[in-house]
Amino acid sequence: MTDAGIMRSWRCIAAFAGTVAVAMGAVAAHLPAEKFGLSEGRTIMQSAVQMQMWHSLALLALGLGVRSPSRLTVIAGYGFVTGMLIFCGALYVTAFSGQHLGSVAPTGGSILIASWCLLGVSFLRHD
């Protein structure tokens, strides 16, 4: 995929992830408490929404601000996508079902942390 294609995909993914975050935020705010799988389901969902929105904005910034991404920047960007899906998805499942998915959320969170570190290293090396 070309640099322009990567940037475009990040912008598109960021826009749709932001859309889902806003929708899930509305669900978290208005869904009756008994519809959540846990008593703390609303709080768990709000955490997922917050993390999804922050990482959607980070991905959008990469898609708009990086002209020629290095290999590390590309890995970091796609790490944001993967981490968001795994981390936020696991939290949404837990909030609605009440079932913890073991190490799924921590794995997604670790991917997000590693992606931020890779992004920082890429900026140190290439900018």
Image (cartoon, rainbow, N blue to C red):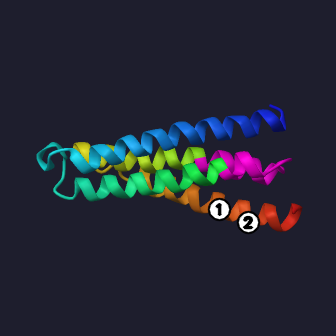
Question: Quadrant of the rendered structure where residue 124 is?
Answer: bottom right
Quadrant that contains the N terminus:
top right
Find disc 1 in the rendering and name its residue. Answer: 116
Residue 7: image location, x then y, percent: 74, 40
Residue at image position (77%, 65%) is 121
Residue at image position (37%, 58%) is 47
Question: Extreme left residue here?
Answer: 34
The front one of 56 and 80 is 56
- Amino acid carrying label 1: it is Trp
Residue 106: image location, x then y, percent: 45, 58
| Residue stretch in magenta | 61-80
Say if residue 98 shows up in the picture. Answer: no
Question: Quadrant of the rendered structure where residue 89 is?
Answer: top left
The front one of 24 and 73 is 24
Let me know if residue 68 is in the magenta part: yes
- Amino acid carrying label 2: it is Gly
Quadrant that contains the C terminus:
bottom right
Residue 109: image location, x then y, percent: 50, 58
All told, the count of numbered labels is 2
Q: CA distance from mark 2 to mark 1?
A: 6 Å
Residue at image position (14%, 50%) is 33
Q: Say which mark, if any, is on residue 120.
A: 2
Image vertical order of residue 43 relative to residue 15, above or below: below
Taking 86 as reference, is 39 left or right? left
Question: Quadrant of the rendered structure where residue 13 is?
Answer: top right
Let me know if residue 49 is in the magenta part: no
Mark 2 and 1 residues: CB-CB less than 8 Å, in contact?
A: yes
Image vertical order of residue 16 relative to residue 25, above or below: above
**Neighbour tally class for label 1: few under 14, some 14-19, many 20 plus, Cα within 10 Å:** some
**Neighbour tally class for label 2: few under 14, some 14-19, many 20 plus, Cα within 10 Å:** some
Residue at image position (57%, 55%) is 111
Say if residue 71 shows up in the picture. Answer: yes
